[in-house]
Amino acid sequence: MSLSNNFKSNGFSKISGIFSRDEINKLRHECIENIEGPQNVQWPEVPEPTYISSILEQYNNERSITDSFDRKLRNCIGVSEEIDNLLVKFFINSEVNEILSHFFVRPKLNNFFVRHIDGKGNWMGMHSDSSSTISMSILLNDTHDTDATTVFIRGSHLYKQPVKNKIERLNPRFFSNLVEYSTGTAGDANIFFNR
């Protein structure tokens, strides 16, 4: 089965081998250095986003945010030339392009951020972020099913009604027989529908 057909059927897929070990080490170093950046805003003091117009939010890469799940997040495009160059390599990868060109006429990058979760972070319940996007995550460390990581329900993107946030208060561990974890070795990319 082709990568795009597998993705279409399952709703998620993993791509390995995009980066060399040296490149993933550089990406990890740059991301960690930049998430610890000059300014961190703690939840619940996170300010409301600034809107340029009624539909366009201003992109802010000058601060990191610690959210209510104790995850640190920072928009990272334009923060580091090293990160930007490695993202170019990611997006020109033939397997990434196979999926994007199969589902989109002109794919657009909506946002790119680094998410850091240490061993003290809280789990995030089952949810979906949007019904019209594809998300991609590049693992910066080896990730196992015992780590706080994204989970997938095989085929849930085909449900007539999206999951959305209906069961977000429930720990994904309660659904361990239904979910697959976003796991892999450093450098693996997990691509998934957000429905």
Image (tube, rainbow, N blue to C red):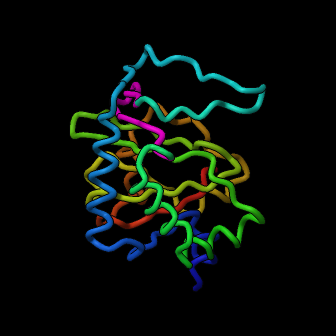
106 to the left or right of 29: right
In the rendered image of this protein, does residue 69 appear above or below residue 34?
Answer: above
Q: Residue furthest top?
A: 45
Most foreground residue, 81 or 160? 81
Q: Quadrant of the N terminus?
A: bottom right
Residue 122 rendering spot, x and y as whole percentages: 32, 33
Residue 193 rendering spot, x and y as whole percentages: 60, 57
State which region is magenta. Answer: 64-77
In the rendered image of this protein, does residue 37 appear above or below residue 156?
Answer: above
Most foreground residue, 9 or 88? 88
| 74 magenta-colored | yes
In the rendered image of this protein, does residue 28 appear above or below residue 64?
Answer: below
Most foreground residue, 127 or 90? 90
| Residue at the image position 59 percent from the left and 84 percent from the top | 2
Q: Residue furthest bottom?
A: 1
Residue 157 rendering spot, x and y as whole percentages: 64, 57
Residue 42, image quadrant:
top left
| Residue at the image position 28 percent from the left and 43 percent from the top | 33
| 176 magenta-colored | no
Residue 118 rendering spot, x and y as whole percentages: 24, 40
7 to the left or right of 51: left
| Residue at the image position 73 percent from the left and 64 percent from the top | 104
How many numbered tags mark residues here?
0
Q: Residue furthest front?
A: 81
